[in-house]
């Protein structure tokens, strides 16, 4: 991604709700979330540019996830990821008009359940860290207003975008890994 493309991305402020951040350090999770925003389609990034956006990311137990899932969706089971959109039904363009107050605009929350995700990754034959990355992308897209439960076309658009972002991040990680190995030699 060029520096011009990165300049279009919003400044992302993350708040972490948990002592356990899954398999990441805070800085790695910050970089991952920023990378997800950097890989959003350009028209969406243009609408969010020059904004400071705040997103809460939390890692919780299966018991807490089951409780949250019941509160939000009336489902009596744990799940991998839940998102809370602080601005439901509001197009992102309306959220990105110049703020009348200082400080970041609160987008919402993404809650991940590492123990559930680890079991899911094992069952599907996925790498645990990749599974969390994929689900964090999923949660962020929900916070940005994407939905897959109401409309089949919207679901397809959301999953296509989720897959494209994940692929870009995977390609970046492979390139970084190769470059690091070359430097080590």
Image (spheres, rainbow, N blue to C red):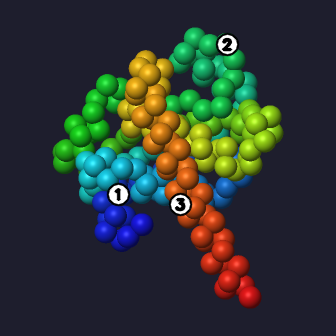
Disc 3 crowd rating (10 Å Cα; few below 14, some 14-19, many 20+) is few
User: Label 3's element?
Assistant: helix
Can residue 140 be seen by looking at this rendering?
no
Compare residues 126 and 34 and report the one nearer the observer. Answer: 126
Question: Image quadrant of residue 122?
Answer: top right
Tell me residue 72's x, y (percent): 53, 18
- Residue at 56 percent across and 43 percent down: it is 136
Q: Which residue is drawn at the image coordinates 41% and 20% (left, top)?
A: 151
Measured Cα–Cα span from mark 3 to mark 2: 33 Å
Tag 2 or tag 3, which sits nearer the N-term? 3
CA gap, disc 1 and disc 3: 13 Å
**Residue at horizontal 68%, vertical 35%?**
113
| Number of marks in the rendered image | 3
Q: Is residue 22 left or right of residue 122?
A: left
* Rendered image: mark on residue 31: 3
Q: Which residue is mark 1?
A: 9
How many residues crowd around disc 1 within 10 Å: few (fewer than 14), some, or many (20 or more)? many
Q: Earlier in the sequence, mark 1 or mark 3?
A: 1
Near-viewer residue (122 or 89):
122
Label 1: which secondary element: loop
């Amino acid at each position: 991604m060029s520096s011009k493309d990165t300049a279009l991305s919003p400044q992302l402020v993350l708040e972490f709700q948990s002592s356990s951040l899954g398999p990441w350090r805070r800085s790695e999770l910050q970089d991952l979330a920023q990378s997800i925003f950097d890989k959003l389609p350009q028209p969406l990034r243009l609408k969010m540019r020059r904004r400071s956006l705040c997103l809460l990311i939390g890692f919780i137990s299966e018991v807490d996830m089951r409780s949250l899932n019941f509160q939000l969706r009336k489902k009596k089971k744990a799940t991998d990821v839940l998102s809370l959109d602080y601005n439901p039904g509001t197009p992102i363009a309306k959220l990105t008009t110049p703020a009348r107050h200082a400080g970041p605009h609160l987008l919402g929350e993404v809650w991940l359940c590492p123990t559930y995700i680890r079991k899911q990754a094992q069952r599907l034959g996925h790498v645990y860290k990749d599974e969390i990355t994929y689900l964090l992308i999923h949660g962020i897209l929900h916070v940005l207003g994407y939905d897959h439960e109401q409309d089949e076309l919207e679901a397809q658009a959301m999953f296509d975008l989720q897959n494209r972002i994940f692929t870009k991040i995977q390609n970046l990680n492979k390139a970084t890994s190769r470059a690091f190995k070359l430097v080590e030699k």
